Image: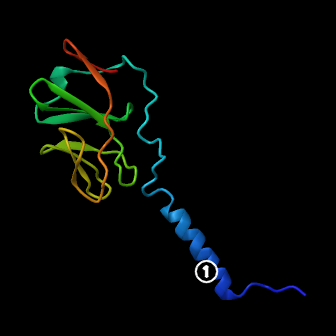
């Protein structure tokens, strides 16, 4: 004698599977979305290309370079820690994600405006003369 599943069992199973898939990307601690295949030593920009109090996004390299104060350069992943969108602008002292409005401070990558709760991972750069390179 075989028992066929009830409508309730099918709906509960489908709902649980959908919930699991839907939550799978949010907050994925093991995500490698901040990694870049660009080699160390690759020049990103000239120091004059990065505005004081602002920054520039390098989409192909997945890096944001900022200059919070004259002569001080910082670099961060350009992948939002909320849901993995690529940030698209730097203005008003923040790095901005278009997907859900998360903003990060240009000084240290910390969250300035949720829904993101984690800072942007810092990237290593080297400033040599007027050249900014990945370290």
Q: Name the outermost residue toward the right.
A: 1
Its colouring scheme is rainbow
Quarter of the picture containing the N terminus is bottom right
| Residue 15 location (% of width, % of height) | 57, 76
Residue at 67 percent of width and 87 percent of height: 7
Rendered position, 43 above or below 80: above
Percent from the top left, x then y, of residue 89? Answer: 23, 43
Q: Quadrant of the C terminus?
A: top left
Q: Residue at x 58, y 73 (%)?
A: 16
Give SS at disc 1: helix
Residue sitting nearer the eye, 88 or 113 = 113
Q: How many marks?
A: 1
What residue is shown at x 39% (from left), y 32% (from top)? 60
Q: Residue furthest left?
A: 70
Q: x%, y% of residue 96?
A: 24, 48
The front one of 9 and 96 is: 9
* Left or right side of 107 for 115: right
The local crowd at label 1, few if under 14, some if 14 to 19, many if 20 or more residues have their Cα within 10 Å, is few
Relative placement, left or right, of 14 versus 63 is right
Mark 1, residue position: 12
Q: Residue at x 19, y 27 (%)?
A: 73
The quarter of the picture where residue 82 lies is bottom left
Q: Residue 41 or 60: which is nearer the viewer? A: 41
Looking at the rendering, which quadrant does residue 76 occupy? Answer: top left
Residue at the top extreme of this rendering: 129
């Amino acid at each position: 004698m075989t028992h066929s599943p009830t409508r309730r069992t099918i709906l509960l199973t489908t709902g649980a599977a959908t919930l699991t898939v839907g939550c799978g990307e949010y907050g994925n601690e093991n995500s490698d979305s901040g990694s870049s295949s660009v080699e160390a030593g690759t020049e990103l920009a000239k120091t004059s290309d990065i505005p004081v109090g602002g920054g520039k996004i390098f989409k192909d390299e997945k890096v944001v370079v900022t200059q919070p104060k004259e002569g001080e350069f910082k670099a961060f992943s350009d992948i939002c820690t909320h849901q993995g969108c690529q940030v698209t602008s730097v203005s008003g002292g923040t790095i901005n994600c278009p997907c859900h409005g998360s903003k990060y401070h240009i000084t240290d990558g910390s969250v300035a405006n949720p829904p993101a709760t984690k800072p942007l991972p810092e990237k290593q750069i080297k400033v040599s003369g007027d050249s900014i390179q990945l370290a």
